[in-house]
Amino acid sequence: METFWFIAITFMFTIYVILDGFDLGAGMVHFWVGKTETERRIVLNAIGPFWDGNEVWLIAAGGTLYFAFPRLYAASFSGFYLPFIIVLWLLIFRALGIELRHHLHHPVWRIIWDRSFWLGSWLLVIFLGAALGNLIRGVSLNDQGYFFTPLWTNLRPTPNPGVLDWFTLLFSAVAVSTLMVHGANFLALKTGGLIQERARRIARNGWYALTASSVIAVGATHIIRPTFWDNFSRYPWGWAIVVVSLLAWAAMGWFSRRQQDGRAFLASSAFIAGMAAVTAFAKYPVLLYDMEYAERQLTIFNTASGAYSLKVGMGWWIPGMILVGIYFVYLFHSFRGKITAPPEDAGY
Amino acid sequence: MESALTIHRLQFAFTIMYHYLFPQLTMGLALLIVVLKWLGLRRGDAHYHRSARFWAKIFAINFAMGVVTGIPMEFQFGTNWAAFSTFAGGVIGQTLAMEGVFAFFLESSFLGLFLFGEKRLSPRAHFFTAVMVFLGSWLSGYFIIVTNAWMQHPVGYVVDAAGNVQLADFWKFLFNPWALWQYAHTMLGAVVTAAFVMAAVGAFYLLTDRFVAYGKQFVRLGTIAAAVASFLVAFPTGDVQGRNVARHQPVTLAAMEGLFETKKGAELILIGQPDMQNLRIDNPIHIPNLLSFLTYYRWKAEVKGLDAFPRELWPDNIPLLYYVYHIMVGLGTIFIAVSFLGIYLLYRKRLERARWFHWILMGIFPFPYIANTAGWMTAELGRQPWLVYGLMRTAQGASPLVSDGNALFTLMGFMGLYALLSILFLSLVMRTILQGPEPGEKES
């Protein structure tokens, strides 16, 4: 049952990264694909109806994590205190950028909010990547199962580390390049003309950066956490996930060279899902490693809610997710098609 | 870590009070928008649809503010109150997760359709999206109230070997008797806010002679909704909730009412200042025997005062608790008086012309916000010194390793960021109100 919730939460966070990933990516490349005011508005309109629904996945995933593994939630949220609060501020700031720019027709006003949208997207992706790095590296837990990690110490992945060190920043680089390609794929799919051309170019070139940073990150993982692949030798079918991820990686490069934007977008989504699945598979059943003492690590078994609670949860979570699936298919279906001419300053 | 605890409490109090300024309007407004859309469908009058569209704009701005200030609330359970989350997550994680899965997805998906989809959807389908937004926001309120109600009055749990609580009876937890009344009381409070805001905007239009047709509609609907909701928020919901407190948290009731001594035939204090040195109310104005009657329906019933309880069970800020409770009740009484006066004017067909009354309506709208905030402060201060009533003290709940310096940094950051948000929010809402519901008069 703990395993079910481990998979469920991995699933929800993965969906979050795939969905919010494309609007974060679009935010990062915002100024490169949108050179004029009109083009930038098209970029924003392409993600306009989706971004807040995408962020709901983060909230729902967080809530589900709290429900299933409360001790992990408590330890990690208080341990990563500053980065989590800063992520909150960035989410707020970035939302302001999207929602406020069209309320005043003044160039200075628009530049301010375009820039905060752009900067918020970059910093969020850097933190997301570092978060993944922290999950692989681990932290220094005390005997109560709590820890506190400052933003950075000496930038080295040694015991009592900071959130940011060379290892976790390497994962930031992976996240930046991956989501940039992912966002560019989405924009290429949703737009036309010059914007589409620029987005395709970013997707093509970003793929090389993604390849390079991923190879280095995998190599570094081998040094920092040599046991990372143990689960794969124990359960060899896990290699299937690795193979699928590699296929997705190849497909990303293939389709973006052939300008098949829809397929390229699906490939980058699959690549993100593959990375998440590989990490989850390798870590199972550990949620948070300790860097020195294996017996202190937080696993799905020593942090889970009571068995009754987890069972009741399955009773509402599964139907709930089916409903959510229906909403999202309906929503994306209603707003399908390309954004070409900027509509009247849409909505509110 | 004494000072860190204070900062954790201040930060949670500040962020939650600020956050709740927005949901109280959107939850109430969601209902009123459904009413407007329904009237539009029934009477085939385009004015109602345009009104609904106008209020949807106000709704959207408030909704966005509610979302961005709401995410920190869920996070802070983990970041600032880790010991509490470890202790109680096995129970309240249930409702917090359900809120995400059932309410937020519903709300955000259908809000998108409601705002952007009026042209794509049929009138009936568009009405349906409004209903779903309403349902989502009220469902979300229910999950939060169940969570809070469990902290006020824990039911359906067991304590496990590690000393943490775990869920034992889902349905008992979900239909906590405390939650049902608290929910009705809170949601009606939200309708009071939305109704007075609608009436105030209508009064503003009538006083400035712009959008007069809409002004009349807003004043009429706002006044009727305010009258119904302000009455129900007092009777039966506030009344029953008060007696729940008397039964399950008698020390809280004594502190709220400023009753220092146990007595038969206890008086109801209307005005006065708690004097914690001498343990009495200074300058009291009170009605003899009324508190006994309201609590037990007997004029001479005995009501336990603070002296009946050991000091370590007293709420730790009795004067503030006493004041916020009296502010809530006092304002609630004023709302009933004003809205019933409005109903009387409506009955005499003078509501639309009585300019003096429009001034009152326009001036009153901040007060429901104050009353709702004071009500929540009553609930939360009244629960002290407990974080989970009878099970965990507030002092035990904070994150053990987050230092006061780090907590102060984020508290100050939230204050600065929310100050900025307030300025942007107010200017946007003012612009929307000045532009009005008539599409032709839009300034570019």
Image: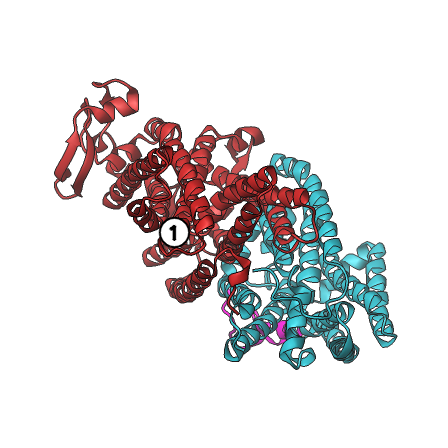
Chain colours: A cyan, B red
In the rendered image, the vertical position of residue B321 relative to residue A195, given as above or below:
above
In the picture, measured across the screen, residue B6 lies left or right of residue B275, that is right
Does the rendering let one see residue B386? yes
In the rendered image, the vertical position of residue B246 relative to residue A139, given as above or below:
above
In the rendered image, the vertical position of residue B140 relative to residue B10, given as above or below:
above
Q: Check disc 1: other Cα within 10 Å, few if <14, some if 14-19, many if 20+.
A: many
In the picture, measured across the screen, residue A210 lies left or right of residue B381, that is right
Disc 1 target residue: B206
Image location of residue A161, percent across then percent down: 55, 70
The picture quadrant where one finds residue A347 is bottom right
The picture quadrant where one finds residue B425 is bottom left
In the rendered image, the vertical position of residue B174 relative to residue B62, given as above or below:
above
Image location of residue B331, percent across then percent down: 29, 41
Nearest the viewer among B396 and A26 is: A26
Image location of residue A118, percent across then percent down: 59, 74
Type of residue at label 1? Leu
Q: Main secondary structure of the magenta part?
A: loop
Chain part drawn in magenta? A149-170
The picture quadrant where one finds residue B18 is bottom left
